[in-house]
Image: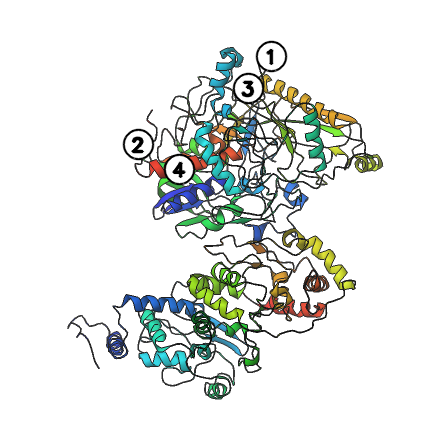
Amino acid sequence: MRSGKDPLPGLLPSLSVFAALVVSAGSAWASGIDPQDFSQLERGRYLAVVGDCAACHTLPGSGRDFAGGRAIETPFGNLLAPNITPDPITGIGAWTDDEFVNALIKGTGRHGTRLYPAMPYTYYTKITRDDALAIRAYLNTVPAVYNPVKSNQLPLPFNIRLTMAVWDALFFSPGGFIPASGKSPEWNRGAYLTEGLGHCGLCHTPKNFLGGDDKGRRLQGYSLQGWFAPDITDDLRRGLGAWSVDDIAAYLKSGHNKMSAATGPMSETLNLSTSRMSDTDLRAIAVYLKDQKGRGKEVVERVDPASAPMKAGAQIYADECAGCHGANGNGIAGLFPTLNGSPVVQQTDPTTLAHVVLRGARSVSTAQAPTGAAMPEFAWVLSNNQIADVLTYIRNAWGNSAPPVSADEIRKKRQTLVERDD
Amino acid sequence: MPRKLPRKDAVIIGLGWTGSILAHELCDAGLDVVAIERGPWRDTATDFLISYAQDELRYRLQHELFLRPAQITVTFRNNAQQTALPVRNWGAFMLGNGVGGAGVHWNAETFRFLPSDFVCRSHLVERYGEKILPEDMTIQDWGVTYDDLEPHYDAFEYLCGTSGTAGNLNGKILDGGNPFEGPRSRPYPTPAQKQGYGHTLFAEAAKQLGYKPYPQPSGNLSQAYTNPLGVSLGQCTYCGFCEWFGCANYSKASPQTTILPVLMRNSSFEVRTECEVSRINLDRSGTRATGVTYVNASGEEFEQPADLVLLCGFQLFNVQLLLLSGVGTPYDPQTGKGQIGRNFTHQTMSTAVGFFDKEKYNFNPFVASGAIGMCIDEFNGDNFDHSQVGFIGGGYIGQVRTNGRPLESMSLPPGTPGWGVKWKQALRDNYLSSIICGGACHASFYSYRDVYLDLDPTYKDRFGRPLMRMTIDFHDNELKMSAFLTDKYAEILQQMGAKQVVKQPRKGPYDVTDYQTSHLCGGAIMGDNPGNSALNRYLQSWDVPNLFVQGATAFPQNAGYNPTGTVGALAFWSANAIRSQYLKNPGPLVHA
């Protein structure tokens, strides 16, 4: 053990805290974490924001930052996010810096156990060691909270951590970020943030049946938590093709731009992470996203405007929707999203649309765009048929095109949404 | 014993327009602020749903957004010889409830008072001599001028995004606006709303008669707008469900659509809803407020200490709390002494209904908004010579039809049966081709010695506190004025081409069951010395300098306009005085 200072006799805290003090002091010496270094701590705080650590590790409303306990929903069951405060017994106070860095970039627990990829080490593996240590330095400064969390709540066989070794072998490619030659530093910064610490693909990249990223369709959209995280490639119809770099940056900063508004899980990402990021980093992410090719040209057959669902949908739209979203689907900037040309409206998977119509949705309120306008629920007003028709209509009205929505799909969504407790 | 809570810098009683404005201004100045609100939390997304917001039965007839008389009411009589009885169903005025207050259910007419309105008494005496004033009239100057308030009118209009056409820009009279208005430093933030056929036809007829019609300034916005706080409002859809309703489209200016989204993000602000303040606590000297006592929905009592108390409730309840708390001296109508309860006023509303040839006229009355309409100001305030007309005061006249709601907005020619085939036929014949406009002549109500508020000696609320007693009647001055204005309006309807005009001038006695407006004013008025007012020119209590009383409670008499613009301007004016003077040196801002 290397200790900078011997604690004064008679002022010894409990043995475990004492141990933690010397361990962390020791590791600081070894790795270059300097608890007095404001720049490193501040950088670590910022990086923890970029990585959105609080989204999982802070139980909302608990007032106990990073003390864990929040349920992370996966297709295989729930995991509880662990306590990452410096508490030596229930948190990570006793971890060495190497153990911490390995958790981030290799997905290993303290004693070499496998983490579940709800912890996005598949993305964090691209983080530099310097950045990882800065995050550690920051986490050392947050109040230690005694809060034991039993993370693994999965059913058999997923509760056997060893299975993750197989999973990792299949889907995890460890390795740091390698800047692309021929791309600007801004693009590369964007790539580092998007593909690494920002872990955008965790929600926005389609997954295979075992929950691994479908790498051939990176950032092309994925359904989770009762929503569809849309395609964020440069695809013109389903992605951000019609958005400028400024539009994307404004959206990430304020949750709103002249076409769209963030809601659902993205509201939380906005509040905890992107709205607190620097304008430079947001632009870098936007520049990188604008360079991601989507599915490319594909022919989507428009639903015949003279068909019965389109005609009924147009009537329902005029009665129930046009007051806010406008007869031409143009909406009102800052309040009501534009439907005409909207990527959210034209995703192949209509989960988000069904969610918004059935349960309503509140757009995020941020310092830059505080209004937080919301749409009421229509589950009690419209039948499954009517909702299917109006969604088919908005997906194929104006310049839009997307597959029709069936009443049976809405019936199923209604069922699953009713069961959700969020 | 009430549970004593940790001290706050400021406690606000009532979170309506003035409470929201003051809360935001004080939080912005760094104060820790709590608002105590009697009613529920309300916001657009959860309470005013587009899918049922336009429910006339629920909101208009069953009073969804309003206080219940069983919760609290007032007693009413026409004069001191009568015994007042409790009001058991709201009629002449509506009492808002919940966060946003009357700012939720208003029509959103956003007027400025005339410069001469603020110097009402001295202006009239100077122009006509003392003898023009009826003997028992108690009008007086406000102690604040239009020029003092101009920047604060501007602040309120830009907060709301008010839609209108300027008539006087920095002294330059502009076509299309109201040429009688005081000079404004900037145009309205958004252009005037579009007008319906009936409104346009009225304006043409008024022009033919030599008047200068102008669009009514509207808080239902003509276009989308983002206010200086960054809060966005949408464009009005002219659905015609404004007054008595919450707006589902984010297009009516209200605390919810202009301030609360920012205020609720502020960590130094807190609102406690469903909590009713039972009294303002004073120290032993009676000259300093120590906070408030309130009761929550479970009946638990709390004491909230605060350095600054802002009374921001509705006019009637502001006066009631002052009387119950022993602030100032109750008004005595016998001697004219005492300030609390004095100069209580309302409004003098009248109209005429125009029936038109259904083959030639189709007004589509359902295309409307709460503050749509074309008005003339030739007969408002002292814009015309009163020396020969036998009254003082006046009002704006306008085709300001706000809705074509099926239950409320049916007025049929005299002689039509009340039910059956003939009634149905008359409805079919007249619904689209008549002009029915409740607020056509919107006129002043000046103050009188025998119109006042005091505590009822008999009737008590559920906490055992005496109810407010209203003693109010119309005086000849107002009834003559109403007849005069109604005639002028009827002339314009004739000019428009009506085949039949039915005049409905205001008649006495004052009827508490007949809706006029919810513009109750006075009772703790502002003025230039403690001998003639309860509040100084900054709305600060003369008696308790750390108490400020907001709202129309401070109006010495009511002018011929809707009051909310002036209420908003006074709130910004008062907030500015608190921020720039009071907080630096707490104490009386005006030394008597």
| Number of marks drawn | 4
Discs 1/3, front:
1
* Sequence-wise first label, 4 or 1: 1
Which of the two residues, A280 or B440, is positioned nearer the viewer here? A280
- Per the image, label 2 sits on a secondary structure element best described as loop
Look at mark 4 in the image and give the residue it sits on.
Answer: B576
The residues bearing labels 2 and 3 have C-alpha atoms spaced at a distance of 36 Å
Q: Residue at x 49, y 12 (%)?
A: B130
The chain letter under disc 2 is B
Query: In which image quadrant can residue A4 be found?
Result: bottom left
The disc labelled 1 sits on which kind of residue? Answer: Gln
Look at mark 3 in the image and give the residue it sits on.
Answer: B81
* Sequence-wise first label, 4 or 2: 2
- Per the image, label 1 sits on a secondary structure element best described as loop
The residues bearing labels 1 and 2 have C-alpha atoms spaced at a distance of 52 Å
* Sequence-wise first label, 4 or 3: 3
- Per the image, label 4 sits on a secondary structure element best described as helix
Q: Which mark is residue B388?
A: 1
Residue furthest to the right in view is B421
The disc labelled 4 sits on which kind of residue? Answer: Asn
The residues bearing labels 4 and 1 have C-alpha atoms spaced at a distance of 42 Å
Q: Is residue B3 above or below residue B521?
A: below
Same subunit under labels 4 and 2?
yes
* Sequence-wise first label, 2 or 3: 3
Discs 4/2, front:
4
Which of the two residues, B260 or B499, is positioned nearer the viewer here? B499
The residues bearing labels 1 and 3 have C-alpha atoms spaced at a distance of 33 Å
Discs 2/3, front:
2
Discs 1/2, front:
1
Quadrant housing the C terminus of chain B: top left
Q: Which mark is residue B285?
A: 2
Q: Is residue B172 above or below residue A131?
A: above
